[in-house]
Structures are given as C-alpha cells and as structure tokens.
Amino acid sequence: MKTLGLLETDTLYDDLLADYTSYGTMFTRYFAGLGVGLNYRFYQVQQGELPADLNECDAYLITGSKAGVYDNLPWIAPLQDWIRDAYAHKRKLIGICFGHQLLAHTLGGHAARSPKGWGIGVHSTRIEHHPVWMNDDLSHMRLIYSHRDQVEQLPPAATRMASSEFCENAAFYIGQQVMAFQGHPEFTAEYARRLLPRRENCIGPDVFQRGMCTLEQPNDSARVGRWLGEFIALP
C-alpha cells in the first residue's frame, strides 16, 4: 500500500477542531470514504517539520492554508526549498489551494492576490487537458472553492488542466509527477457552511451570498479523489 505524506500548512479554527481535527485528517477521511487505500504520515510544516528523507513516502500532498505564498513567514522558504529538492528527485507532489499556488510559485510560475477578489462555493471549470494516464473524458469539473489568491502564471513545464473565466489556472499537472487543484476536493458542504461565514465581511455580502447558495449543488470531489488515488499509484 502506498504512503501519502500530508504536509499540513495550517491549523483549523478552534471551533472546527473537535469535528474535523486537521486538514490532514480531513484528507484521510476523504480518501477512506472513496475506498482509496493509503497509509499516511503527517508533517506539521508551520512547526518546522518536513520529511527528513524523501523516501519516507510515495507521494506528498501540500494542504490549504490561510497564508499566502508571498507572506514573510518563517516556514514558507524552507518548504519551497524542500519542494525544489523533491521535484528534482522525481517525487510525486500534490497541491490543494495554497499547495496548488505554492507548487506553481516555487517551480517557476507565479501566484498572487487576485484583483478579481474572492471565489467561494461550488465553481465549475472547463477541463482543457487530461493527463495521458487518466482514463476519463469529463469536460467540466465542479469543486468547492475558498480563495482570493490565484496562480497567475504556470510553471514552464506545466500543462493547464482546468480553467474558467474567474480562475484561469484552476488545475495543472506536470507529467506524472505533479498534480494541483485550486479547489478543495476534501471540503464538504457542511464544512464550508461552518468555515465561510467568519469571512463574510472580507468577502463582501453579494459574493458571499451567491457562493453560499451554491454549496448544495453536486460536485466532482469523489471523481477528483479517484484521480488522485490513481496518480499516487502510478509507478
């Protein structure tokens, strides 16, 4: 069974801890619910914990975070150095939201605060390219989003997987080594309903209400989870 390293780049708000524990735990529950069998190792990146040996896991996933890739925080530069080393040594890397942005930013692209503002709720993107290993012809992908930073430029080696007018680089991949999504496949509608109201003033009432009204719409989180399972299993 493959081992997935969960690089946790944030902690949950206090009122969410009892029910959700951590971003890493949310991913273990997510994959378990889909029948994706994995072992896990957890790394608390904000506390300076990174894999000491790249062979500790078969693949690594960088979670979401309230931080921005441009923030002057002491744990971001060491994480970027680790990403460069892991990429150079052909390790499989997955990025979700902040992780998606940081992978792009570190591997030669650019992420920044978007002038378009917040994107929240269920958002649909066009699938422009499918990786060669992916046996799926889905034309659009719907996930729950919560972000105001975006990947503005992809790394030179990357292929855009999904895009929309609001989020041009909503997902990308690099061969069979990197896969990254701006959306949150691990989020449930219940979690988003509890998370997002604390950000209403920052988001703005109109965008907030429109986004919250989409949360009960169906989305493709299960499909994305199966893709990620297939990606991790690739030789």
Image (spheres, rainbow, N blue to C red):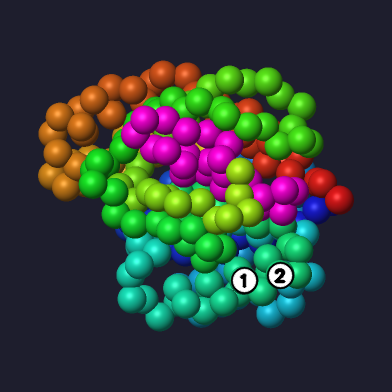
Q: Which mark is residue 84?
A: 1
Place residue 159 in its image quadrant: top right
Which of the 4 image quarters holds residue 5? bottom right
Does dot 2 land on a helix, a strand or a loop?
Answer: helix
Q: Position of residue 186 (x, y in %)?
A: 52, 41
Say if residue 91 shows up in the picture: yes
What is the residue that sits farthest to the front in this orientation? 156
The residue shown at (74%, 62%) is 91
Q: Which residue is identified by label 2?
A: 88
Q: Does the residue at mark 1 contact the one at mark 2 (Cβ under 8 Å)?
A: yes
- Mark 1 lies on a secondary structure that is helix
Callout 1 crowding tier (Cα within 10 Å): few <14, some 14–19, many ≥20: some
In the displayed structure, would residue 160 be above or below residue 107? above
Residue 226 vs 202, above or below: the answer is above
Task: Identify the amino acid type marked 2.
Answer: Ala
As for residue 164 lying within the magenta part, the answer is yes
Identify the residue shown where x is 33% and y is 70%: 71
Q: Of the numbered discs in the image, which one, if any, rests on residue 95?
A: none
> Where is 86 relative to 115, above or below?
below
Q: Residue at x 35, y 62 (%)?
A: 68
Task: Give residue 131's quadrant in the image.
Answer: top right
- The three-letter amino acid code for the residue at tag 1 is Arg
Q: Is residue 125 above or below residue 80?
A: above
In the image: residue 192, left or right of residue 181 = left
- Compared across the picture, whether 169 is left or right of 235 comes to left
Q: What's drawn in magenta, residue-wise?
A: 160-183
* 196 vs 89, nearest the viewer: 89
| x and y, in percent, of residue 121 in the image | 35, 31
Q: Residues within 10 Å of mark 2 (few under 14, many from 20)?
A: few
